[in-house]
Amino acid sequence: MINDASANTQPTYYEEVQRKGYTRRDFIGFATMMAAFIGLEKSAIGQVVKALETKPRVPVIWLHFQECTCCSESFIRSSHPIVADILLDKISLDYTETLMAASGFQAEEAMKNTMTKYKGEYILCVEGSVPTGADGVYCMIGGKTSLQILEEAAAGAKAVIAWGSCASNGCVQSAKPNPTNATPIHKLLKGNIPLIKVPGCPPIGEVMAGVIVHLVTFGKIPELDRIGRPKAFYSKRVHDSCYRRPYYDAGLYVESFDDENAKKGYCLYKVGCKGPSTYNACGVMKWNNGTSYPIQSGHPCIGCSEENFWDNGRLYERGSAFSGFGIESSADTLGKVALGATGTAIAAHAIATNVRKHKLIFSLEKEGKQSEKELEE
């Protein structure tokens, strides 16, 4: 559990909302949106509101290693201004190389002070993979390797969040031949520190905000799937919520990006879409204030929230068939399969019926012969 030991020195989130000039309506709207995103019932909105009103901000150290900063970019471009203006601005001022005003000695001192003052209370956010090759010389900050910084910061953290695919699964840096020996965070952490993976290249800003709001509201990490991702956002395949799914079921596919089928918005599976094997909330939450997502923009899903996605085949070649109707199925094919299954079932039923009849006749004949023998005696 994340305690409130810093209550006497840190303002609450609602106090920061007021200080920034947002109205009570803005605040309630934000709390409602976050409650919906993290999968809470309507009756739980009050719980989120109360937590943000009464709990002090959680100290956060946000580290950057081998990455492109797209996770931070995604966060600050969330559809709701409070995400960037309050959550990001106020939780990350403890330490983040990208957004903090301080630099050099002052920046490193800020991180050291947070680690000392809030030991066991702060959240460690990590953006980027850690290079362990050549003794870590590929990514050094303040004379320390990324691995050294990670180990020092994680030692006193209450929980660790791996932002994006670089931190969660290594992303392109760890793709073969992986010259820097780029390594995801979970393979380097020591001890039993709770870890939340929020993969994506980048992850959706509202997903990132939802994870933080869950931590603030309930004081613990959200329920995770088998590889450490929050189930609220990674429990369904992109394929299951895709508006092009009916075309897949009907056997209507884009064959090339410039054909008529592409203009008609048919399924992108044949041109490499990994939606059927990718778990993410893209099709539901979308990007840019819920405007669109890659598939809606005409580009196939590349499966960026899955492990080793860069090495799982070429991006624009379809994957192998998976359980379901099958990639080559058409309405006629499905009809034939269904008809064949029906015919097989009818034949099996007929055979079973004849067997039962044969057994009954044999039994009656046996009983009849036995009765005749008894009468003769």
Image: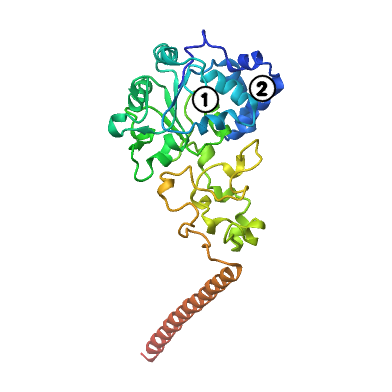
Marks 2 & 1, CB-CB < 8 Å contact: no
Q: Which mark is residue 350?
A: none
Q: Which residue: 66% across, 57% down?
A: 263
Mark 1: which secondary structure? helix
Query: 90 or 260, which is in the foreground?
Result: 260
Determine the residue located farthest toward the top in the rendered image: 8
Q: Is residue 210 visible?
A: no
Q: Position of residue 236 (x, y in %)?
A: 53, 45
Q: What residue did someone put label 2 on? A: 27
Q: Quadrant of residue 331?
A: bottom right
Q: Quadrant of residue 155?
A: top left
Q: Is residue 22 visible?
A: yes
Q: Position of residue 105 (x, y in %)?
A: 41, 13
Crowding at label 1, few (<14), some or many (≥20) Cα neighbours within 10 Å?
A: some
Crowding at label 2, few (<14), some or many (≥20) Cα neighbours within 10 Å?
A: some
Is 370 situated above or below 228?
A: below
Q: What residue did someone put label 1 on? A: 218
Q: Is residue 241 left or right of residue 115?
A: right
Image quarter where the N terminus lies is: top left
Q: Which residue: 62% across, 13% down?
A: 15
Nearer to us: label 2 or label 1:
2
- Badge 1 amino acid: Phe
Mark 2: which secondary structure? helix
Q: Quadrant of residue 154?
A: top left
